[in-house]
Image (cartoon, rainbow, N blue to C red):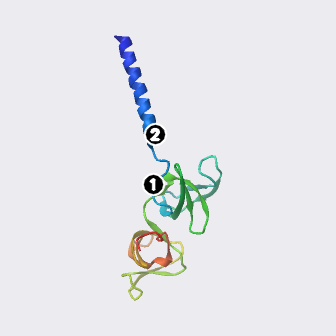
Amino acid sequence: MIKTLAHFFSFCLIFSMAQNTYLYAKLPLNSGLPIPRFAALRSADVNLRTGPGTRYPISWVIKKKFLPVKVIAEQENWRKIELHDGTIGWVFQSMLTGNKTAMINISKAFLRRAPQASSSIIVTIGDGIIGQLKLCKGNWCRLTLSNHKNHTGWIEREHLWGAEFDKK
């Protein structure tokens, strides 16, 4: 009886391992999401590496949470990203979030009440300010600025880094 139970449990263990191997073999090596696309940094302390793995040296440590980045390639769990200044490197996929953010890329921009140049100005903002991208319509995008009393308004798309691939 004990020998039969031992054989049964051995069979279950081997079957379970075979099933897990099969499942792991079926996992995709890449996300299947479009390339290029925008994502945002999940943390205020992200290592940017020269290649896709921890064996590659860290070229920069990015200290700006929610910074929008352009994902330009994938290799297994690593994402090759481009920063607003053209810097390119690799980050581990868990350091990115799909939350839509955008960064002001001009020294002086206006957040407006409506998507029109004639609309009243809510607040004047400058280069490097990051906001949550709500939606884009044509040449305008709706943005919420959490650093600025949660102001929400419209800004011209050309003044944003991170809105390039959003619906036109």
Instruction: Left or right? Give the position of 72 relative to 135.
Output: right
Is residue 146 shown to the viewer in this render?
no
Q: In the image shown, does 62 or 19 lie closer to the viewer?
A: 19
The extreme bottom residue here reads: 118
Image quarter hosting the C terminus: bottom left
Q: Secondary structure at mark 2?
A: helix
Question: Count the marks: how many?
Answer: 2
Q: Secondary structure at mark 1?
A: loop
**CB atoms of marks 1 and 2 within 8 Å:** no
Q: Quadrant of residue 107?
A: bottom right
User: Image point 37% across, 19% down: which residue?
Assistant: 8
Instruction: Left or right? Give the position of 105 relative to 59.
Output: left
Image quarter hosting the N terminus: top left
Q: In the image shown, does 38 or 58 lie closer to the viewer?
A: 38
Residue 128, position in %: x, y? 53, 72
How packed mark 2 is, by other alpha carbons closer than 10 Å (few <14, some 14-19, many 20 or more), is few
Residue 21's disc is none
Residue 44, position in %: x, y? 52, 58
Amino acid type at circle 2 is Tyr
Q: Which residue is mark 2?
A: 24
Instruction: Left or right? Give the position of 147 relative to 83.
Output: left
User: Image point 60% across, 67% down: which residue?
Assistant: 86
Choose the circle earlier in sequence order: 1 or 2.
2
User: Image point 46% across, 77% down: which residue?
Assistant: 157
Residue 105, position in %: x, y? 53, 75
- Residues at marks 1 and 2, CA–CA distance in whole angstroms: 16 Å
Q: Which residue is mark 1?
A: 32
Amino acid type at circle 1 is Gly
How packed mark 1 is, by other alpha carbons closer than 10 Å (few <14, some 14-19, many 20 or more), is few
